[in-house]
Amino acid sequence: MAEDRDHKDINGPEDKPLRYCMICRRSEKDAGTLLALPGGMTVCNDCLQKSMDTISQSGFPGFFGSPDANGMPDLSKLGGFPGFGMVNLGSLQPGKAEEEDSKEKARKEQEREEAERKRPFPPVRDLKSLPAPHRIKAALDEYVIGQERAKKVISVAVYNHYKRIFTDSMDDIEIEKSNILLLGPTGCGKTYLVRTLARILDVPLAVTDATALTEAGYIGDDIESVISKLLAASGNKVEKCQRGIVFIDEIDKLARKKNASQRDVSGESVQQGLLAMLEGSNVEVPVGASSKNAMVPMVTVNTRNILFICGGAFPDLEQIIAERERMRSPMGFGAPLPAGPDEDPDILMKVTPEDIRKFGMIPEFIGRLPVICPLRSVTKEMLIEIMMRPRNAILRQYQKLLALDEVDLIFDESALEAIAEKALERKTGARGLRAVIEESMLDVMYEIPKDDNIGTVTITGDYIRGKGSPLVTIRGAGKLLDKKD
């Protein structure tokens, strides 16, 4: 009789308020007849069946007894199973679930607002929110040390690129895309500059390596995989992907091979395959995968509004530039000799498209990268600033690590100069800083946590050069000790 009353109550007059399933929150109109449970709760047949299947797969196939004539479990036989406690359905009231959902939404909204406050300017969504070039460069200055011309070139190029996107349909004048080519030795900040730019503009960024690209049909990544990575970074949203940035690193590895007798499947052929993509074309890319196959859905992405930035170290390009300068130098007695690549540290700033063509890049590829931006080699003064000035400077990282042990870490000026000198000897640019500091700080990071009385550790230049020990101050005593003491 109780079940009959419940069914009659659910299927009552139409003027009664709709009931909702306590699990999926669907109404009677969408979920069909709802089953009444003790405590005034209702659940649909689909959710109840899923719950039964879950418990059956957990090792309790006969827990609910045999089903009734309608195929539903006999709820009258619940309970009595030793060592098994039923979930308190009263704790799953819709009001509590909604309250937890609202708290989670409020937490995510607070995190989003916190991230927005830390941004130098709001995300780029339209022409009004697009920051001016000087503001973009000012934001880059907080993270990237030096390379003033490169930051100015990239700021202007990105500003014009997004102006072109947002004003594309305003008149009949079509603005062409200006892709960028970054030249510079390893460790000068090419990749870091592009990553920082994408982060402060909040636009999708895909960083790929040209060494993995091969001609279609050969083992390796297809050329379309470049756009696949950008689509994944855009959350598989095609419209957002078509306004992103692609950074192809190690582009100099695609140079034409000197030996023409061998098939160049990862050099000139890849340059030719990238031509249409750089200029703007419709590319079919797989969703959620890096290669095409019959099991993966495909989408079409137009690369016309995607900004391509290519970067490479271009080793021995300085020799080509020096040879060209030597051919143009005046001849005769008393004529000044042109400076060689070792004598002129800024010789890369004199690069021309003809020098890049002699290096091995085809003219069609160079023509689709109209903005050529060489970066300067890092100097000793730049390395010292890189260690101290940026927000996430490497010295601040180590100071934070020791601060967790309640120890203050100090680097004096002689230590900074010694670290910069050692990094220059490695000829790996700014990447050499972490290698030198990791090697020097190994013993300090190992020994300091042993003693809770240590309050301050001072790193000196003699310790970096291997001629002394760091100075240790005992907490509250003000006494300086060598590390070995």
Image (cartoon, helix red, strand yellow):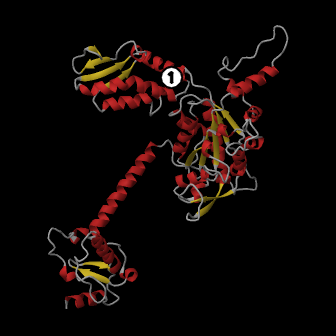
In this rendered view, identify the residue nearer to me: 307 or 63.
63
Q: Amino acid at mark 1?
A: Ala
Question: Percent x, y for residue 192?
Answer: 54, 37
Residue wearing tag 1: 423
Q: Is residue 132 visible?
A: yes
Residue at 66% across, 37% down: 252
**Secondary structure under the numbered disc 1 in the rendered image:** helix
Horizontal side of residue 113 vs 206, given as left or right:
left
Corner quadrant of residue 483? top left
Q: Quadrant of the C terminus?
A: top left
Residue closest to the far front: 261
Q: Quadrant of the N terminus?
A: bottom left
Residue at 43% across, 46% down: 115
- Up the image or down, 200 lies above or below 38; here it is above
- Up the image or down, 426 lies above or below 202; here it is above
In this rendered view, identify the residue nearer to me: 285 or 170.
285
Question: Percent x, y for residue 466?
Answer: 40, 15
Number of dots carrying numbers: 1
